[in-house]
Amino acid sequence: MNFICWTIITCHETKKARFGGSMSSKFVETVKTSEWLLADGATGTNLFDMGLMSGDAPELWNEKFPEKIIKLHKNAVDAGSDLFLTNSFGSNALRLKLHNLGDKAFKLSKLSAEIARGVADCYDRPVFVAGSVGPTGEIMHPIGELTHKTAVEVFHEQAQGLKAGGADLLWLETISAPEEFKAAAEAFSYIDLPWVGTMSFDTAGRTMMGTSPTALVDLISSIPNKPAAFGANCGVGASDLIRTIQEFSKSSPNEILIAKGNAGIPKYVDGHIHYDGTPDLMARYAVMARNSGAKIIGGCCGTKSKHLRLMRAALESEDLGSIPLLEQVQLEIGPFSSPYVNEAKKRISKRRRRRE
């Protein structure tokens, strides 16, 4: 019997006895009643450190190197994460077809959740497995060729695999198009699991497809299958993400928000992408994210266990404070990469008035 099978059988039964009932139900209860939860950090960054090459499909490592994926997850939980994401960001049929693996979407998604379940269940505290669902990689109709129906089918297949493998919830992330967010929400409505969703706001406070934080709030209010939490991940730097969280808080002060920002700004150094965010910087980001309204807080690109460890320590040691001013955010964790679209328009308008 291999390690994965052993841990699933022994640890899962032990955990059921300790905590009782469904971990999915426990997640919903926990996220509502907790002051905050610490999510994990980067997947890609940490796998690159373990030898993943650019252009390779990380999801194949669930088959080829499960021991490395186990280490990835274990490092996050040992650093203090209350939940972590499966190695399944791109395990949908459309992304996998780029590697001639389109027919393995269900299998690789299921395997990613099985590995994660085996790790999570071996801890003597609740640790939740979030089934990572990234974008399809295609542009949706009417701009592109991907139809709503096909997108729903693709997301549904991946979600089925994640549920079959033991995920506690579905975690939609790094979405740019509202149409894709809506398709995933419909697909998840056929899966008996809670779900959360984040978009990536990386272009002057909007997603690549032009969606603003307020537009995401409006979208969520319009869909029948609403997420248990929503927010932002990736994008540019931690400062920009804090600003986005504050926008969400203004529009939806009573919603459960997610902040999963990058560890600083990416820079190209010696042939590799390097993130300049230190563990101390990410600790300040974590506290500011919580004070700005986020309840589920983690890191995205560049975030390693050394960052998570200090993030947890800061959240545990500092009491909830007031919402930080944007000037304070920039002073403590770095300048914004660009003004918001509405801020840019105001500046242009002022310059025009001066010329007149």
Image (spheres, grey):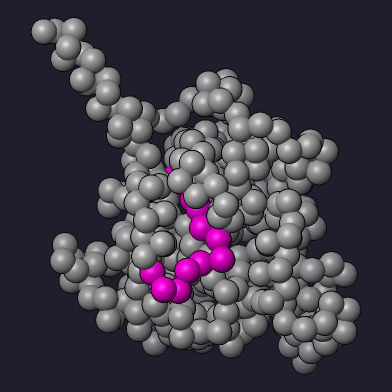
Instruction: Please give the name of the residue rendered at 59% of the width and 88% of the height, measured from the top-left corner.
Output: 164
Q: Does the segment drawn in magenta span residue 224?
A: yes
Q: Is residue 132 visible?
A: no
Q: What is the residue that sits farthest to the bottom in this orientation? A: 1
Q: Is residue 11 above or below residue 235?
A: below
Instruction: Please give the name of the residue rendered at 45% of the width and 74% of the height, measured from the top-left corner.
Output: 225
Left or right for 17, reference 102: right
Where, by quadrant of the figure, is residue 216 drawn? bottom left
Q: Quadrant of the C terminus?
A: top left
Q: Nearer the viewer, residue 174 or 255?
A: 255
Q: Quadrant of the N terminus?
A: bottom right
Rendered location of residue 61, percent (x, y): 56, 72
Q: Is residue 296 above or below residue 276?
A: below
Rendered location of residue 294, percent (x, y): 60, 47
Q: Nearer the viewer, residue 186 or 160?
A: 186
Rendered location of residue 62, percent (x, y): 58, 76
Q: Specify start and end residues of the magenta stretch as a single range.
A: 223-235
Rendered location of residue 336, percent (x, y): 45, 29
Instruction: Please give the name of the residue rendered at 55% of the width and 55% of the height, measured from the top-left corner.
Output: 255
Q: Does the segment drawn in magenta span residue 307?
A: no
Q: Nearer the viewer, residue 142 or 134?
A: 142
Q: Is residue 59 visible?
A: yes
Number of dots carrying numbers: 0
Left or right for 139, reference 318: left
Instruction: Please give the name of the residue rendered at 64% of the width and 51% of the height, measured from the top-left corner.
Output: 295
Where, by quadrant of the figure, is residue 123 drawn? bottom right
Q: Is residue 297 above or below residue 10?
A: above
Q: Is residue 192 above or below residue 325?
A: below
